[in-house]
Amino acid sequence: MSSVIRRGIGMNDRIAKLREQSVTTEPTLSIERAVLVTEAYKKYAGKVSVPVLRALTFQHLMENKTIVINDGELIVGERGPAPQSAPTFPELCCHSVEDFEIIDRREKIYFRVDEETKRIQKEVIIPYWQGKSMRDLLFNNMTEEWKECYEAGIFTEFMEQRAPGHTVGGDQYYKKGFLDFKKEIEEEIAALDFLNDPDAYDKQEELKAMAIACDAIITLGRRYRELALELAEKETDPVRKKELEQIGEVCGRVPAYAPRTFWEAIQMYWFVHLGVVTELNTWDSFCPGKLDQHLYPFYQKEVAAGTLDRDRAKELLECFWVKVNNQPAPPKVGITLKESGTYTDFCNINIGGIKPDGSDGVNEISYLLLEIIDEMRILQPSTNVQVSRKNPDRFLMKALKVIREGMGFPSVFNTDAVVEELLRQGKTLEDARTGGTSGCVEVGCFGKEAYILTGYFNLPKVLEITLHNGTDPRTGKKIGIETGDPLKFSSFDELMEAFKKQLHHFVEIKIRGNQVIEKLYAKYMPAPFMSVIIDDCIKKGKDYNNGGARYNTRYIQGVGIASITDSLSAIRYHVFDHKNLTMEKLLDTLAKNFEGEEKIRQMLLNKTPKYGNDDDYADSIMLQVFNAYHDEINGRKTVSGGKYIVEMLPTTCHVYFGSVMGASPDGRLAGMPLSEGISPVQGADRKGPTGVIKSAAKMDHLRTGGTLLNQKFTPQLLADEEGLTKVKDLIRTYFKLDGHHIQFNVVSADTLRDAQKNPDKYSSLIVRVAGYSDYFNNLDKALQDEIITRTEHKSF
Amino acid sequence: MHQGKVFNIQHYSIHDGPGIRTTVFLKGCPLNCHWCHNPESMDLKEQMIYRIQKCIGCGDCIVHCPEKALSMGDNGIIRNEELCTLCGRCGEVCPTNAMEKVGKTASVEEIMAEIEKDQVFFEESGGGVTFSGGEPLLQPDLLIPLLDACKNKGIHTALDTSGYARWETLQAAAEKTDLFLYDLKHMDQEAHEKYTGVPNTLILENLIKLSRMHQNIWIRVPVIPGINDGEENVHRMGEFVKSLGIKKLFLLPYHDIAAGKYALLGKPFLLKGVRPPAKEKMQELKELIVPYGIEVKIGG
């Protein structure tokens, strides 16, 4: 247990200090960005095209935002005016003063909001933005039926208060500076054919906007250079003085020019990151993707030249780690908070995997990054290892040694499956190989794709509505279609047919809404800065939010596959096959939330074939549900000509989706969480991890854009080399079976129970939630309980 | 059709031989070791266990019992052992599995189907199946066909045995077994009989013979404080194992997590109060054996 709560070790004094500041600073809300954005809109809106308006707004931000160099740091730049200070984005979501009060006061995931901030929000921000934010626009454009489904918890909507993003940087800005990008943009403008190309004007405006965005980020670099030199002038400590001069030199180089050194490369990425997350509140912030592969050439060159050693490289990377951790995800409210209740902003660094030519991509930096994760023990960035059959076991073993420390970092991905998934979606082989995973588990081609998560989809809720012939039993509202009185179903197949019809109905409502939302963002919320760095926006003269990327994919994430499988299995087994129960009795019992019917509940829990035990009775039902969901969504066209693909992951949405549901036929009580990811229902897997893996692998992961499998192991299972080796073999086997991803909580339920009782004792206990890790104390009680009840695999 | 009594099939078994293994526990044992951590394995025939803390008092078991052997008492269900035929119907209907039948008759085909589910893990990890018990050699009619079936499928086999069996049976099994996990409990004849119910003569003789025909034997010694952890005994073990040319020995520290199972089965637990050996003690014992040229590992 002590290893679980141990603070970071091994780092030098500089990093220890920066880290301490990062983890102890209370998150605050900063109104500065909102004020600057409002100023820019007041000045430019209506006078210039929308892309140019967005670019000028971005420029206004880069020219005027408070900049700061924290004591001792080597990598510079904050999203807000100070560490842990989060900006707001009134153009996306204009908070009410009451929202601010809730954000300030709520027990978990709070941000301190001072009185002055509230006053400005009330007097300056709200009067301008009320009714004009994307959130207002979006809800005004949704149909009544969409709103009813949204409120019923059939699905969520990612873009209702944050912008599309979910994209990851490629290698472009390690090879080019923003002056180079600007030159390319100007060449495209010069080549526009106004005589023959009807879109020439739109392209011109977009390209002009991109050019302004390049200038803007260069301005930010220049300001940091000036600040560093100014501080150096005043600095009395000669060592720090030298460092500040070096920072000035680095910022004099990047982002205007391509980086030459390891330090410049990291700073370059960080400027790009800040640009993306300041321009808009993109989901999953931004991410460097294959950081080890991007940085390795700089490392190699400098180590050979004797200008860098391993320790210095590590120190620079740890400075970068602190920068990422300094940026909590901006405050969320409402359902968005429920589906993603965390400070983590999902910058998920990929380590290992393969190179664009298909060869083993593990290098010295890969091992260095693993060491850093272990040393830093910090919430952000998220990390994952990409494991290909070509990667050495040594790499996976080293990752497992970090995993067994119990933080849930790094998660483990099957690179070979990721490549196949991308190929199936139509990417070229090289682009597929430059891809990876981001956010929680989502695949995409780094630097070349807009792959947008559009919302979670509540599969068990669709069954609940099917069992009530189109009515939501919670509200009595008829939000589905009539698919038949369930009491009259004479076979399980009839029930499945009804479910599929209901599923079709709700998926179409979701996608109709998505199409409108996609259009709204294309029209009103272009992202010219992000467009500069994602291929082929410049070439196409098209914005990232308007199909400018080489590939455009939209995901809808299915939640609760195990809960619905076990529910259907229970109906099939007890109602149709064994007639232990009539449908009427079952529905009546569920309506009563099993009150006075504990015997039936126990029978459903204990005497039903369940998913997660390599039992085809249950697993074949899982496949039927998965295939129905997949076939309903896969390949549908998005507005910009991209495709819809399914994913299977929940973040924290399984808790919210469970809260809008009554009792279910798998024995789950009303309001309790659903299963998460593709993991079995908490406690339903009774045959150990091999059973879970076999069941999970029956799903065709290659037809998804990502699946999430959580496993909880007791620390003893990974205590020695032999235990680790066997977990490694377990992972390799899952990957041989095309499993997409697996992650581990290596902590005992007893420890978690103790942590729940004594939060102060466990202030640094980090656990795996679903696709990310979080401080146990940051989780709400329902989620804490859910993690405790997950099956704990023990040693035999 | 070959069949026999098993009481558990454990997947992801990682302490019963190399790689990821599936351990098949056969029921019934001629020994009666005081420390046995699988007391439910001792009897060849099935047993009923009842966990009162799981019982919700629904009475379904009473209603469904064809022999009317069950009744409700102050402390939950009472089972009349004279009437009970161990048919297991009560366990089938019990919604919470408070009433559970331990052990069932299974065919070679059924057991193989369960084993083969894990074949992909065996192949990746260099694992396989381990037959344990009870004493698997007590049911040669089940064990030998299972070993054959595994060989046919290319599955690595390990046999976890007390060695207390007819030599002919052991010899037949040895021809089809890749690895032996052979228990040595005590070198002293009298002590062995006292704590396991049988003398060690047959066990030692069998091991001598086995070591002449089989290259792959791991010795496993359960370390029971106060019973077999004396220096003299340990030295005798080292000498004996060395004389057979066996190179690998595991010291398995005694643990008391099975105590609760004895209570459920209504069996007396004779080692009450014995604490698991300290880490340092295990290390000391290891160091006594290493000089015999044997590779010693602590734990499974």
Image (spheres, coloured by chain):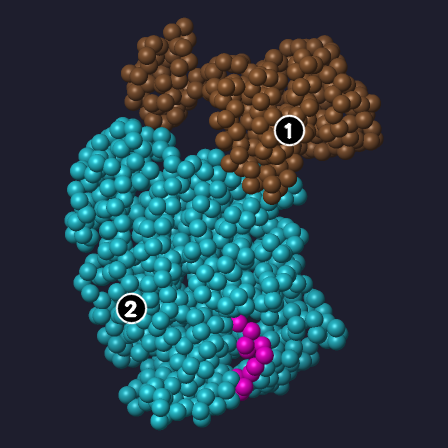
Chain colours: A cyan, B brown
Q: Residue lying farthest top?
A: B82
Visible residue check, residue B76: no
Asked if residue A400 is positioned above or below residue A690 in the image, the reply reads below
The chain containing the residue under callout 1 comes to B
**Quadrant of image for the C terminus of chain A:** top right
Please name whichever residue, A50 or A227, is drawn nearer the observer in this view of the structure.
A50
Disc 2 is placed on an element classified as helix
Residue A464 in the figure: left or right of residue A526: left
Looking at the rendered structure, the kind of residue marked 2 is: Gln
- Which disc, if any, is residue B158? 1
What type is the residue that disc 1 sits on?
A: Ala
Quarter occupied by residue B35: top right
Where B175 sits versus A56, above or below?
Answer: above
Q: Which chain carries label 2?
A: A
Q: In which quarter of the image is residue A283?
A: bottom left
Dot 2 alpha-carbon crowd within 10 angstroms: few under 14, some 14 to 19, many 20 or more: some
Q: Is A177 in the magenta? A: yes
Say whether residue B42 is left or right of residue A524.
Answer: right
Task: Please say whether residue B139 is one of the residues in the magenta stretch.
Answer: no
**What's the residue at 63%, 44% (across, down)?**
A725
Instruction: Provide the residue span drawn in magenta.
Output: A169-180
Name the residue carrying label 2.
Answer: A515
Most foreground residue, A262 or A493: A493
Quadrant holding the N terminus of chain A = top right
**Alpha carbons under labels 1 and 2: distance apart:** 60 Å
Judging depth in this view, the residue of B229 and B18 nearest the camera is: B18
| Secondary structure type for disc 1 | strand
**Residue drawn 50% across and 76% down?**
A272
Provide residue A441's location: percent of width, then percent of height.
Answer: 46, 58
The residue under the point 72% across, 69% down is: A309
Q: How crowded is mark 1: few (under 14 residues within 10 Å), some or many (20 or more)?
A: many
